[in-house]
Image: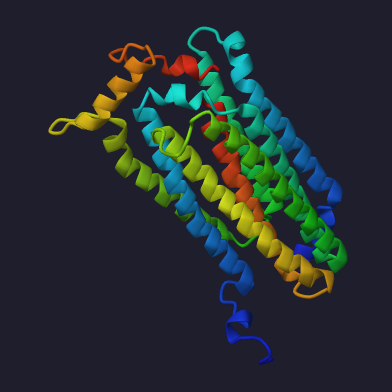
């Protein structure tokens, strides 16, 4: 066995490469984190009829635009994976940069949206609804920022044809962040 | 591995673009849901029910499409599906255990006075009748 990599990297009892398995476990724990937060929101929303009025102030068009941006960046991420599978590191890096650009557009839209809301007096301390709104969307935005940073590092390696298997791993994470938003969107913007 | 490569050949760029296009159509439908709902509501099918279906029904379909096709769960080892399902079940367990105490403000031997007072205060401030069951809740879903 080659000793150039740590033993854990080459060990595979499940038949799944270690790095990929680790990403799936991260996502498993993320399901509980976001799931717990969203489940808490749902039970509070159902128990507080007065939140309907608070929720009516969120802007569906901002949420819809951001859903479009994230879905499109997910497409770029899977195209990066497709390129990496064909051994084309340069192309994979380009698609990853596109994905990252999607993340940045998402954050810019969110910044404009939040600025307007805060100027209207809807802050994280206004009431229970806005506390959940900023906490859930904020935690999600932190995941977008983290994903972008990791993506830039992986794109830099992929550009040189190194560690191409990681392109799929950051893609899996990114799609998960997309799925979280897919549920945040109806919760905070549609069914209000 | 060979199986995975076959899969990659089947799923070219056009395939992923097609999934993305379906996702965008679903997104548009979920945005249109609350706008169209009041006009198509009839009989027992009220506007807020249609909104909930277009909002969360479509969200589940979108999440499935992304997980199956973009995350490749459809060709991933079953182990991963079991892992993710377990986590979702844990989340539902948390909801089932906690929701009754949060959604209700009064039980046989307990009363959440603070929550009741807040609902009353806020609804009065909004100019709604605090004593109406779920005052105006479902009307607002149609916005």
Residue at 63% in and 34% down: A63
Residue A57 in the image: state x and y as whole percent.
Answer: 53, 25
Q: In which quarter of the image is residue B133?
A: top left
Residue at 28% in and 13% down: B131
Please, is residue A91 above or below residue A60 in the view? below
Residue at 41% in and 33% down: A126
User: Can residue B126 be spotted in the picture?
Assistant: yes
Q: In which quarter of the image is residue A166?
A: bottom right
> Which of these two is toward me, A174 or A81?
A174
> Which of these two is toward me, B38 or B130?
B130
Residue A39 in the image: state x and y as whole percent.
Answer: 42, 41
| Side of B110 relative to A147 (left or right) | left
Residue B92 in the image: state x and y as whole percent.
Answer: 40, 45
| Side of B138 relative to A62 (left or right) | left
Quadrant where the C terminus of chain B lies? top right
> Which of these two is toward me, A42 or B53?
A42
Q: Which residue lies furthest to the left in this view?
A: B109
């Amino acid at each position: 066995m080659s000793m150039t990599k740590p033993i854990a990297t080459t060990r595979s009892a499940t038949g799944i490469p270690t790095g990929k398995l680790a990403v799936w476990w991260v996502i498993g724990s993320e399901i509980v984190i976001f799931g717990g937060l969203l489940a808490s929101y749902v039970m509070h929303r159902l128990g507080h009829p007065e939140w309907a009025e608070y929720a009516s102030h969120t802007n569906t068009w901002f949420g819809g635009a951001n859903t479009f941006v994230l879905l499109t960046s997910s497409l770029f991420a899977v195209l990066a994976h497709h390129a990496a599978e064909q051994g084309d590191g340069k192309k994979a890096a380009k698609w990853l940069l596109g994905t990252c650009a999607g993340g940045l557009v998402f954050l810019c839209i969110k910044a404009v949206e939040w600025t307007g809301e805060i100027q209207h007096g809807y802050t994280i301390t206004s009431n229970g609804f806005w506390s959940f709104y900023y906490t859930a969307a904020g935690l999600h935005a932190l995941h977008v920022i983290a994903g972008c940073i990791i993506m830039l590092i992986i794109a830099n390696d992929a550009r040189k044809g190194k560690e191409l298997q990681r392109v799929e791993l950051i893609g899996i994470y990114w799609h998960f962040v997309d799925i979280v938003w897919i549920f945040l969107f109806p919760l905070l913007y549609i069914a209000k | 591995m060979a199986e995975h490569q076959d899969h990659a050949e089947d799923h070219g760029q056009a395939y992923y673009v097609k999934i993305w296009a379906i996702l965008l159509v679903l997104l548009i439908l979920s945005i249109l849901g609350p706008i169209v709902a009041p006009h198509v509501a009839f009989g027992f099918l009220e506007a807020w029910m249609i909104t909930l279906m277009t909002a969360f029904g479509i969200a589940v379909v979108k999440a499935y499409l992304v997980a199956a096709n973009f995350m490749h769960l459809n060709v991933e080892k079953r182990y991963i599906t079991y892992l993710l399902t377990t986590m979702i079940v844990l989340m539902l367990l948390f909801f089932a255990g906690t929701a009754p105490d949060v959604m209700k403000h009064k039980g046989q031997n307990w009363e959440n006075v603070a929550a009741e007072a807040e609902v009353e205060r806020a609804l009065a401030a909004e100019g709604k009748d605090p004593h109406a069951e779920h005052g105006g809740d479902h009307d607002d879903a149609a916005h």
